[in-house]
Amino acid sequence: MIIPIRCFGCGKPVAHLQTQYKEELKKSKSPKEILDKLGLERYCCRSLFLSHIDLLETVAKFKKS
């Protein structure tokens, strides 16, 4: 649902990069260029961003009041 604060594999902090990644994707740049620019070199960190599906809005529909 949300990018984890730290990478599961190496422990590098990655959550602060999520907004920059989303903004760059809207500008229709390739994910490889964006991840290189953000300094994510390890495959474990890159996989967090490439495999992430944002389901927060979908899950929020079922929240109890």
Image (cartoon, rainbow, N blue to C red):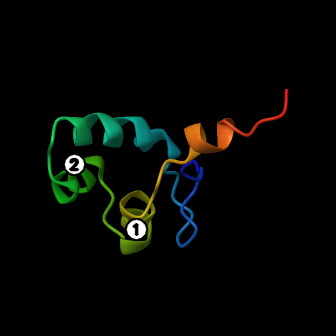
Taking 62 as reference, is 10 above or below it? below
Residue ID for mark 1: 47
Residue at the (30%, 53%) spot, across then down? 39
- 65 lies left or right of 44: right
51 relative position to 60: left or right: left
Give me the C-alpha separation between circle 2 and circle 1.
Answer: 15 Å
Measured as percent of width and height from the top left, residue 62 is found at 73, 40
Q: Secondary structure at mark 1?
A: helix
Q: Earlier in the sequence, mark 2 or mark 1?
A: 2
Where is residue 61, by image quadrant? top right
Give whichever of 40, 57 is nearer the camera.
57
Foreground pick, 28 / 8: 28
User: Which amino acid, mark 1?
Assistant: Ser
- Name which residue type carries label 2: Lys
Task: Give the residue pinned by disc 2.
Answer: 37
10 Å neighbourhood of mark 2: few (<14), some, or many (≥20)? few
Circles 2, 1 touching at the beta carbon (< 8 Å):
no
* Image position of 6 (left or right of 63): left
Nearer-the-camera pick, 33 or 42:
33
Residue at horizontal 52 percent and vertical 52 percent from the top: 13
Residue 46, position as x, y percentages in the image: 36, 64
Q: Quadrant of the C terminus?
A: top right
Residue 3 x, y percent position in the rendering: 54, 51
| Residue in the picture at 54% in, 62% down | 7
